[in-house]
Image: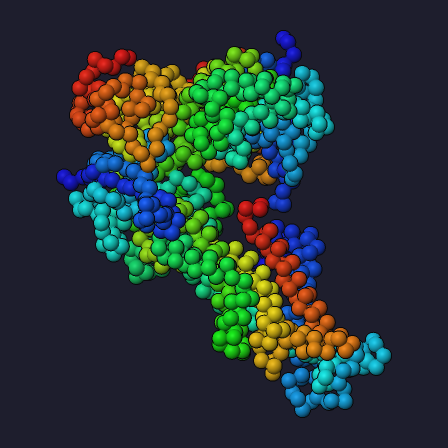
Amino acid sequence: MMSGFWTSEFFHNWRHNASAIAGSTLLVIFAVIVLAGPLLVAQDPYDVGSLNLLDSYKPPMWLDGGESAFPLGTDGQGRDVLASIFYGTRVSVLIGVSAMVLSCLIGTALGLLAGFYGGWLDSVIMRIADVQLSFPSMLIALFLMSAFGTGIDKVLIALTAVGWVVYARTVRGSTLSEVNKEYVQAARVAGLRDGKIIRRHILPNVLTPVIVVSTVQVGTFILIEASLSFLGVGVPITKPSLGLLIKNGFDVLFSGLWWNSVFPGLFIMALVFGINLVGDFLRDELNPRLK
Amino acid sequence: MTPMLDVRSLEQEFAIGGGLFDRLRFERGRVLAPRKIVHAVNGVSFTINRGEVLALVGESGCGKSTVAKTIARIYRPTSGEIRIDGKDVAILGHREMLPVRARMQMIFQDPFASLNPRQKVRDIVAEPLLEQTAGRAARAEVTDRTLALLARVGLNAEHAGRYPHQFSGGQRQRIGIARALSVNPALIIADEPVSALDVSIQAQILNLMMDLKDELGLAYLFISHDLSVVHHIADRVGVMYLGFMVENAPRDALFATPRHPYTRALLSAAPTIREKRDVAEIELSGEVPSALNLPSGCCFRTRCPFAWGRCTAERPTLQAVGDDHTVACHLIDEPERDRT
Amino acid sequence: MTAPLLSVRDLRTHFHTFSGVVKAVNGVSFDIGAGQVMGLVGESGGGKSVVGFSILGLIDPPGRIEGGQILLDGQDLVGAPEEALRRVRGRQISMVFQDPMTSLNPLHTVGRQMDEMLRLHTDLDAPARKAACIEMLESVGISRAAERLGAYPHQFSGGMRQRVVIAIALLAGPRLIIADEPTTALDVTIQSQILKLMRRQIADRGASMILITHDLAVVSEMADHITVLYCGKVVERGLTRDVIGAPAHPYTRGLIDSIPDPRHRQTRLSQIPGTVPDIRNLPVGCSFRERCPRAQALCAQADPPLTAQRASLHAACHFPLTEAEAP
């Protein structure tokens, strides 16, 4: 099975695609940060007891006054910026992936129903999606956040409410093209119930675009969450994501303490860039229409 | 003896034009949601006896595939009866339909689209059987039956674990046939089963189907546009045009003495590598009208070289012209108008 | 004998795919004289469409013409600059494709698409071009031609669209028309209309045609000569009546026998066993030997060359059928 992968066209194309390799490398680095981040830094930025105010606003280590203990400098409480970023990356990725999973489940289910049954169900679901798409997603998220209050769970609700539409539209389109194929008719002739036809026959055949959409959606969600947190309606201050780190650093940016916001900004950029590079590669590889 | 399949006045209409919101419009202060209706099948009747092969021929859009898929209850008929072993199954629900599906299975046209690309061959073939037994059948039993079916259609045990894309068109069609046979049906509906295949593979599949018919006593409803294939496989032939049955006859009678002008045109238009059939040539002008707006009177009058006033005014019904041979054409009453 | 209009010599067109080199056309040779209709017959994977595209220089990567010559009036089109090929396409050689839905641009009117052809290949002024378009549409059987010039392709039915495609192909007065399955997408009564139209138009204009099809019945009614392809090679060629009446190659014979014969209805059709081999992985020796009822030890050792047989026939077979074995 694995030897099949190493000799596959997929792997061959990956090996000859510089941006796919670059994106994958970035994602591997971020995977290590997410999984093993706390082991890589000495300080736990959430543990207030371990902070020393004397270390506050130290510049990055290569500048005058920098210390090798704080490679990217420290913030006003003497927190190691690198440690904050590692912990913040975990929060950002956790939210991005969870929101992707939630909106994927809801959007895929609605898209399958709309495409399979058509008729009024399709009309209702897709019109709701249209209405939703006509508002900027930030606006919807902001509205929901100000209604529900802040917190990771509230952020997830807001992101899911924004994100299901992409899945529903993608899956509905693919479902429409599958549902009239003869293998679905054959399943009817075999006597399968609708639910089983959807689960066993249609779902596996619409998953490819879902995978492609999912990679890109994780990146989008991370950015929206960062924006929300930057505006102060995102994650709570006790569990800062990359977006909140940027906001915190932004307050002192014009005092010359640029490292507090620039480094989290670079990390979020690298993360989303990596996700999008891999997403583009997957889209080209998995989309049969481009082949 | 009750026939295997007895179809009476089958009608099938499809509404097109999208969902409710796409059709909404305002006219003279009222909200309307008009529907466009495609009249795909317009009152078709025929019977198939046990072990008999009835071929439905006609050009694209004549409704022959819709008839097949309606009888297989992929679609619910608009009206009419579909009697299997004498029992009307036209409006049965899913649960009551299940035992009927063990009597009647289907083979599809497109060997690429008719198999789920994500299922292994063994799961594809076993699917109707597992549905019938509701999972009660022992795993070993189903596996044995699947392998036996694959062997019968000319595939071997190692093929069972593969995916459809690893097979050629002809092999895929064999897999589709094995799937249809899995529940031991008495009637197989075959919708253009060889038209997507290369000539040399067509012959293989037709031979396989004929062998299976002799071995298992199958009846076929065989949909095709290819007259030479129909001549080879059918006992009876029904000719369809624009959703109507225009002629229905035993094979030899139909090919030797076609009566409907459309049947005659079809026979003379079909290219052949052998000498032309001994049929006066009728060349048709124009093309098939839209099933959205059926012509008044005879469906064929817009292309018929013989059409006269009566054909516009009055729709001809099937009438007997010989042994088991029926035709829907006013020429039967007024043969002097036939100028060939 | 006069020099042929088009002479294809040992044409080899290969596709370099991930899973191996597909030798779609692998040493194909044939001639077409002026005014001749040649049927290029074979099953899917035989390479017949690739021959058509190669002649027009329309092979895109990963495909490549690896060798051979395509001589139009003695001038080699293989390796000719794109500029020269563009002048040949449409003016000297034009093409009719299988699917009239996709070979017309849905966004432009029929008139504009016809006019473009004339603008590219003639010096006519606008009114003259319009007149030529109307005349051409009428000659392919489209009534109210002047009015229909302003119509879009979707306003025509399938058969009418194929008439438009044929009209466009004929506009610049080409000497060779390559028709790739021109009637496969059409119904049988429409097919017979289109075939009659093509035959008449070709004859009237003294043009030649390569008719690419899988349908032996269609070629036997249309073509003077038949070339049969199998796995990228010519296995048989000759006059239509010889090829259909008494073929020398067992593959041709198998194709003919697989068509049900209404005169002698048997319970079983004679069939070619097996399937077309994977073209990336052809057997050593004759490509057809694994499906051939006449194969012997020699067939596994040497690939038979195309040699002259009886009458007009050339066949690539070590053990060709004799005339006495004709069907």
The N terminus of chain C lies in quadrant: top right
The answer to whether any part of residue A2 appears in the image is: yes
Residue A52 quadrant? bottom right
Q: Is B224 above or below relative to A203?
A: above
Q: Nearer the viewer, residue B31 or B114?
A: B31
Q: Is residue B319 shown above or below A235?
A: above
In-front residue for pair C80/B287: B287
Depth check: A75 or B169 in front? A75
Identify which residue is drawn at 19% across, 17% down: B334
Q: Is residue A258 left or right of residue B46?
A: right
Q: Residue furthest front?
A: B29
Depth check, front residue: B54 or B92: B92
Quadrant, the C terminus of chain C = top left
Residue at 70% across, 19% down: C75
Q: Residue A220 placed where, x, y %?
A: 59, 64
Q: Position of residue A43 (x, y in %)?
A: 70, 84
Q: Is residue A63 above or below residue C254?
A: below
